């Protein structure tokens, strides 16, 4: 923004077109990863993306000036484009120089923990000690079986084994965890790294075969070692707060607008099966905590044990026409809007399961419990891909974990649209 203001000094004039131009440039620079934190910064490396943002901004200005009255002369646009390009490069140069100075002098330092006390991890530790301009201070290593060459010195002590990673992060207020090659298998290491999901730290991974791994705009580099920054857990991003706000507004509005439909459903359930319109059942949600999910009753279970352990009632002979219709149209799920409003669930997320089956599946399916990293949902990625009812639990867990790893607001919107289509075509339960 400061560069944009500087470029407008000749001539100084701010209007709606300038605001749009600034917005386009900021969005382009953000999409190019130029606002994210990085270990190494270089103006020459970033120059193509910076100038690309400037070109997009200038193109926007030309288009808007052609559509709006009072088009600026071509000469003025050329001067402004050149001024903007120079201002952006100058502002970045000053910012990067200031950043490196602040890091070298210790004004900006972040504690770092290195996973793996092997050759690569030790090399990274020495680089960070010798080059403070990267802004990372290695406080120690985490490795259950350090592999040190004879006479090799460590730039920091080995603090503990892998099972104490979360404890070390909290004890040393670690901001960055660098995953190098250690003794632990990758499959087991993923389980360890999952303990960091709720902690305020960034995870950076040295990719396997890093010697042939290209350094792109999506990667960082540390003195020739490529680094891949792991995407933050979705619930640690500002967009997740937008998701919760949308859940509250949507569920509240839906409860009001659909109240006539819910009243008809309630009357039909009462007529077919007598008292007990709402069916409550314990499910497992966020972080493995239980809650009571609400539904319109499809049929009356014999007892609580049947309710907790009967897998699917789709083909149950006791299911009457009203219950069958409610399940086929997913209208039986409407009371869960109250669960969403209360915060027990979200509109989109992994479908919650009963404790009996969670215990059973957790022992059979690797990483099944990872589904509980986010709130359960009224609908989910697995469901819109046909995984509901008597379908593979392993596939469901895989789709649910894919959703969590790749979550975005747009993915939620896509799932809601596909769910709406399936409900209208009666492709439910």
Image (tube, rainbow, N blue to C red):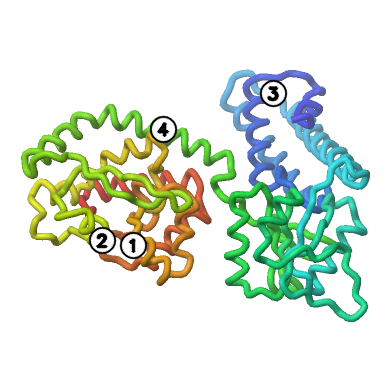
Disc 2 target residue: 309
Alpha carbon of mark 4 to alpha carbon of mark 1: how far? 29 Å
Q: Secondary structure at mark 1?
A: helix
- Disc 4 vs disc 2: Cβ atoms closer than 8 Å? no
Which of the pair 80/37 is nearer the observer? 37
Chain-order first, disc 3 or disc 2? 3
Q: Secondary structure at mark 4?
A: helix
Alpha carbon of mark 4 to alpha carbon of mark 2: how far? 31 Å
Instruction: Give residue 360's position: percent from left, percent from top.
Output: 36, 67
- Disc 1 vs disc 3: Cβ atoms closer than 8 Å? no
- Please say whether residue 165 is visible from this viewpoint: yes
Query: How many neighbours does mark 2 have within 10 angstroms: few (below 14), some (14-19), or many (20 or more)?
Result: few
Chain-order first, disc 4 or disc 2? 4
The reply, left or right, for residue 359 in relation to residue 129 is left
Disc 1 target residue: 357
The reply, left or right, for residue 229 in relation to residue 120 is left
Residue at horizontal 69 percent and vertical 60 percent from the top:
228
Residue 248 badge: 4
Instruction: Give residue 95's position: percent from left, percent from top.
Output: 84, 39
- Please say whether residue 331 is visible from this viewpoint: no
Residue 383 quadrant: bottom left
Disc 3 target residue: 72
Instruction: Give residue 287's position: percent from left, percent from top.
Output: 48, 51
Q: Secondary structure at mark 2?
A: helix
Residue at horizontal 29 percent and vertical 31 percent from the top:
255
Query: How many neighbours does mark 3 have within 10 angstroms: few (below 14), some (14-19), or many (20 or more)?
Result: few
Residue lying at the far bottom of the rendered structure = 150
């Amino acid at each position: 923004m400061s560069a944009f203001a500087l470029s407008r000094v000749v001539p100084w004039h701010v209007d709606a077109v300038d605001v749009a131009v600034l917005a386009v440039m900021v969005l382009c620079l953000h999409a190019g990863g130029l606002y994210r934190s990085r270990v190494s910064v270089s103006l020459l490396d970033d120059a193509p993306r910076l100038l690309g943002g400037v070109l997009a901004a200038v193109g926007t200005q030309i288009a808007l000036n052609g559509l709006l009255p009072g088009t600026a002369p071509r000469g003025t646009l050329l001067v402004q484009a050149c001024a903007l390009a120079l201002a952006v490069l100058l502002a970045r140069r000053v910012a990067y120089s200031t950043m490196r100075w602040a890091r070298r002098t210790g004004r900006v330092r972040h504690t770092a923990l290195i996973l793996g006390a092997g050759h690569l991890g030790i090399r990274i530790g020495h680089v960070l000690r010798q080059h403070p301009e990267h802004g990372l201070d290695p406080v120690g290593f985490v490795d259950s079986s350090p592999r040190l060459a004879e006479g090799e010195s460590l730039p920091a002590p080995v603090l503990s084994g892998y099972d104490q990673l979360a404890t070390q992060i909290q004890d040393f207020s670690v901001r960055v965890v660098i995953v190098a090659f250690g003794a632990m298998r990758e499959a087991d290491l993923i389980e360890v790294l999952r303990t960091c999901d709720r902690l305020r730290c960034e995870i950076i991974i040295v990719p396997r075969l890093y010697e042939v791994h290209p350094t792109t705009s999506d990667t960082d580099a540390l003195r020739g070692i490529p680094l891949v920054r792991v995407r933050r857990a979705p619930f640690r991003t500002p967009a997740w707060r937008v998701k919760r706000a949308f859940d509250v507004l949507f569920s509240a509005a839906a409860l009001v607008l659909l109240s006539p439909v819910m009243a008809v459903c309630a009357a039909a359930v009462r007529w077919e099966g007598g008292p007990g319109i709402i069916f409550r059942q314990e499910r497992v949600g966020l972080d493995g905590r239980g809650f009571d999910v609400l539904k319109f009753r499809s049929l009356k279970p014999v007892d609580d044990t049947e309710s907790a352990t009967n897998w699917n009632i789709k083909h149950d002979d006791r299911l009457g026409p009203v219950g069958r219709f409610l399940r086929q149209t997913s209208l039986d799920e409407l009371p869960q809007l109250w669960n969403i409003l209360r915060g027990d669930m979200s509109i989109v997320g992994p479908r919650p399961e009963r404790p009996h089956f969670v215990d059973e599946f957790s022992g059979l399916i690797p990483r099944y419990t990872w589904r509980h990293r986010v709130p359960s949902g009224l609908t989910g990625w697995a469901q819109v891909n046909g995984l509901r009812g008597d379908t593979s639990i392993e596939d469901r867990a895989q789709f649910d974990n894919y959703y969590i790893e790749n979550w975005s607001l747009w993915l939620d919107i896509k799932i809601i649209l596909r769910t709406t289509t399936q409900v209208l075509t009666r492709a439910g339960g």
